Amino acid sequence: MSRRFGRARAAALAAGLAAALLTACGSSAGTGASAAVPATGTATAGSSPSSTGTVTVFAAASLKKSFTALGETFQAQHPGATVRFTFAGSSDLVTQITAGAPADVFASADENNMGKAQTAGVISGQPVDFASNTLTIVTQPGNPKGITGFADLTASDLQVVVCAPQVPCGSATTKVEQSTGVTLAPVSEESSVTDVLNKVQTGQADAGLVYVTDAKGAGDKVTAVSFPEAATVVNVYPIAALTQATQPELATQFIALVTG
């Protein structure tokens, strides 16, 4: 099956991600943040062995709240099952997975890091793209510096933060720089998109580059400034089961929930 979507389906998934991540990307998940979703049901006599146990999901930091909500739904649908999450930058997650960290599912914020996991031989089957996202600029509320576009981020009086190049949002930023011929001089490069958002929200930076859904999730804590060049760089989110999965059936069922 092709990993690319038809135009109509891709548009629908993009819209779905925006809705699903509306609160997700405003979270302050740090690298390696791990959490188990509170149990919403108890095992019943009719539960099958494949529907019980703990499924461990490694997911991009920008998916924290949306996947946590999906985890609650999954547990309600599978009494006796528990979903445990680890949220971090996609590149950090690949490093952990290839080093042997126990996990059943990997959800990346881009195809590049999923490709690295495939090359390392830790992906079982074919990854499935389930959503997409693009960049936007976020500033202090009210945009006090008067930023109107990507090129304005080079102003000498601005403190700009971006994601590190190996992180999906950082890779997207680099591609925008290359396509526009504009080179940024950020004061810091963060390990996840939520770290960038947090620095702008807390006043440690004047502006940052995050995903559109991060800006929406932050509400009035930031002001979003769109720029047309962002449309040329779209990050696709793939999800896949892992070869070392100890709960392959639950992994398949969780992926079905996400992609369905």
Image (spheres, rainbow, N blue to C red):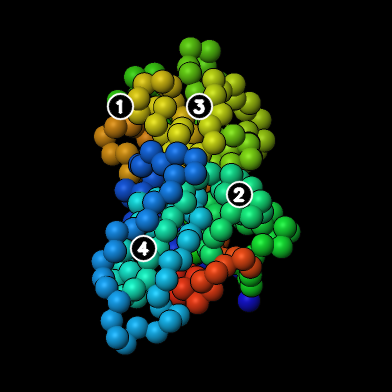
Quadrant in the picture for residue 27: top left
Location of mark 4 (residue): 71
Label 4 near label 3: C-beta < 8 Å? no
Query: Could you tell me which secondary element the residue under label 2 belongs to?
Result: helix
> In this rendering, which labeled residue sits more in front, label 2 or label 3?
2
- Compared to 53, does 211 lie above or below? above
> Where residue 45 sits: x, y (%)?
29, 86
Pick whichever, 248 or 210, lies toward us: 248
- Residue hosting label 1: 141
Whether residue 64 appears in this view of the structure is yes
Image location of residue 139, percent across then percent down: 38, 27
Alpha-carbon distance for marks 1 and 4? 33 Å
Q: Tell which circle, 1 or 3, labels the residue nearer the N-terminal end.
A: 1
Would residue 225 be visible to someone looking at this image? no
Q: CA distance from mark 4 to mark 2?
A: 21 Å
For the point 35% across and 42% down, the residue is 26
- Read off the residue under disc 2: 96
- Whichever of labels 3 and 4 marks the residue nearer the N terminus, that label is 4
Image quarter (top left, top right, bottom left or bottom right) of the N terminus? bottom right
Q: Which mark is residue 222?
A: none
Q: Residue at x 53, y 13 (%)?
A: 156
Relative to the observer, which residue lies in front, 248 or 187?
A: 248
Name which residue type carries label 3. Answer: Val
